[in-house]
Image (spheres, helix red, strand yellow):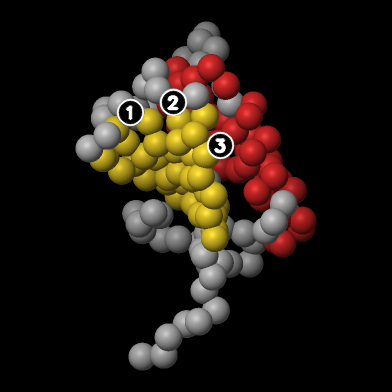
Amino acid sequence: MTKDTSLRAMGWAQSFPVSQGVRAGRQWTREHLESLEWTKDTPEMVDAILLSVSELITNAHVHAHSDAQLILTWDSHCLHVSVHDSNPLPPTKQSEDLTTTGGRGLAIVDALADDWATHPQASGKTVTACFVPPGAPKPRHGEDVS
């Protein structure tokens, strides 16, 4: 078996307290996305990632009443966007109710990401969404995105 030496991983991590809100998370993410060459050619993917970051941090703050630890990992195939919070309960999709102003975060992430999963942990849970740039093979549904 030949070793693939072309795989280069890079990552960034930052904690966003409930008091900071999601704006700081979006700005921080945008700054780090600028270092990935493929983002220059895919502004719509950058927008999808930023919206997903907003939704995942909001879920940590509003539903888990927790700070959000955001980790971005680029592994030369997929940008993994992971948000950890202190609530061990898995996130649940809300029923579609057009009269409410919230409860659509996971549906938005599901629509924008190539795949996503929840990982229970001793200190809470992590939701990870995978974004594959155009031209790269998409993950098969159910494939581990972390």
Mark 1, residue position: 86
Placement of 135 over or under 6, stated as above or below: above
Residue sitting nearer the eye, 145 or 34: 34
Q: Position of residue 94 (x, y in %)?
A: 40, 22
* Residue situated furthest top in the rendering: 99
> How many other residues sit within 10 Å of disc 1, few (<14), some (14-19) or many (≥20)?
some
Contact between marks 1 and 2 (CB within 8 A): the answer is: yes
Q: Which mark is residue 52?
A: 3
* Residue situated furthest bottom in the rendering: 1
Quadrant for the N terminus, please. bottom left
Name the element at disc 3. helix
* Res. 18 visible in picture: yes
Judge depth for marks 3 and 1 and give the one in front: 1
Along the horizontal axis of the image, is 22 left or right of 125? right
Q: Position of residue 58 (x, y in %)?
A: 51, 24
Q: Which mark is residue 127?
A: none
